[in-house]
Image (tube, grey):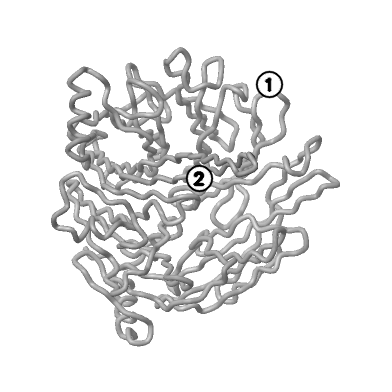
Amino acid sequence: MKTYSISFILSIFLIAFSVLSVFGQINNNAYASVQMGKEYSISRRGEIGSIIGYDKTGFYLLKFETKSLFRTDNYLEHYDINLNQIKSEKLELEDDYTLVRISQLNGNLYLFSQLLDKKTKEKTLFVQQIDSKSLKFKGQKKQIAQISFEGNRSRNSGSFSFSVARDTSKILVYYQLPYEKKENEKFGFHVFDNDMNLLWSKNVILPYEDKLLGVTDYKIDKKGNVHLLSILYKEKARTKRAGKPNYSYKILSYTDEGKTLKEYDVVVKDKFLTDMQLAIADNSNLICAGFYSNVGTFSIEGSYFLTIDSESKQIKTKSFKEFGLDFITQDMSEKQKKKTKKKADKGKDVELYEYDLNNIILKEDGGAVLVGEQFYIRESTIRTTGANGQVSSRTNYYYNYHDIIVISISPAGEIDWAHKVPKRQTTVNDGGYYSSYTLAIVGDKLHFVFNDNARNIYDKSLKEGKVYSFSYKNLAVALNTVDSNGKQNRISLLNTPKKEEIVRPKVSVQVSKNEMILFAKRKKKYQFIRITFKD
């Protein structure tokens, strides 16, 4: 991520403050200053895609507008440091070309598009630079990858995927190649520098049969090496057999421009690793972290942190922290606590459920912070019988985004502490559109922003363990700050009188070392909000 000098950030703030009467209001609190941008209208079929880049002039975002079932118009927009729209440019692609993504690399904007040729049975990926001022295409597009789907239908033509190195110096384009049943999976890898110059490319065959190996993540490091985090099943692709775990984690690393394959077994005696994320340290060692269980695959007993030497393949450091009863019962009602403690007293296993590790944040001192969130989908089907005896049914999907877990790792690889950030977000049939959180890392503090129930912030009579669920009628945008010792503080971020703004955490992003841009909606209007965090 690109960083900015303190003097530059200060100048932005002063400029924004001097034109406050024109560009919107600024609210201040103990942790941050908040600048509200101008409100804009968006059509019923319009949608903000993502913030794709930022520089000293402001930020860039992608917007979609659905015209029909088979047509979507794409717009690239530029907003200045005062959150005003400078330019909106419709992306005019040639016939039959479709947008794949737009990325900012080394300060330049690149558009990736693809062309599907049903006659030759080929799908081709192209890249073309976009001028950051005019938002128009610059130079000629060039072909960078191609998939042959001979023998398959166009709907099974494959897709291009991307991974960017942590220091943004390399980008990986990868895709699955056709293979026969019972064969090993095949992939195409193309590695580029951040000016989109090809460094190496290679087609690889994974060393295990397709039905026994599942790749869960793809990483590229600053040296251009490709790492595949995988699950290896025993005999059959099932998470359990006879009630016991039936898989283990394995890392496949392709080094020396894809010529060398290294395999790393990530196995810890007496621990079942239920969830894993992978990060590559600056010294090329592999960092594995997640949750473990002694019981099953859908609950967690504690967290772990492993460092694997990339040369010897040995686990250098390992640390485990069991989530004790106090941690598990944190934010439970008294009734729930008594029930859980009674279960533990009987010798039964008491564990957490449905948590996923979202981030491994590597710190400059060699330590790390792990961030996870409880997420699950509950399905409910209602069947009714009409007057004529005809039975009809309707299925609702409940998207649940609940507590956040924060785990601090010392430079020695030991787990220092683990804490929950209490949160309740349940919505129906919307994919969790306004749920989850966005995170800004500023100094030694973690700033979580999410939509909350105002009673969790303002209700002084709130009983211990009581957490009210996010509500549109009683909305507050929460800023929950966690310091280096795990101490927390929660405030209402937007002190607006009507409290009608609701943010989309999945679109919001940290844009510099102490700033975040939030995307917010209020009825049929949308706006951007700049958060400048204080030291």
Q: Position of residue 469 (x, y in %)?
A: 31, 51
Which label belongs to residue 182? 1
Q: Position of residue 160 (x, y in %)?
A: 64, 46
Dividing the picture into quarters, in which one does residue 332 lie? top left
Instruction: Locate residue 149 relative to residue 193 in the image: left or right.
Output: right
Secondary structure category for the residue under label 2: strand
Instruction: Locate residue 394 relative to residue 351 in the image: left or right.
Output: right
Secondary structure category for the residue under label 1: loop
Q: Give, as a three-letter code, the residue at label 2.
A: Asn
User: Looking at this view, is 493 or 8 the one in front?
Assistant: 493
* Residue drawn at (25%, 49%) of the image: 467
User: Looking at this view, is 453 or 212 the one in front?
Assistant: 453
* Residue drawn at (42%, 40%) of the image: 376
Q: How many marks?
A: 2
Dividing the picture into quarters, in which one does residue 135 lie? bottom right
Q: Give, as a three-letter code, the residue at label 1.
A: Lys
Q: Above or below — where is 178 with respect to 32?
A: above
Image quadrant in which the N terminus is located: bottom left
Q: Which of disc 1 and disc 2 is earlier in sequence?
A: 1
Instruction: Locate residue 453 relative to residue 399 in the image: left or right.
Output: left
* Mark 2, other Cα within 10 Å: few <14 / some 14–19 / many ≥20: few
Which label belongs to residue 396? 2
**From this viewpoint, which residue is outermost toward the right?**
119
> Can residue 225 be seen?
no
Q: Above or below — where is 330 with respect to 134?
A: above
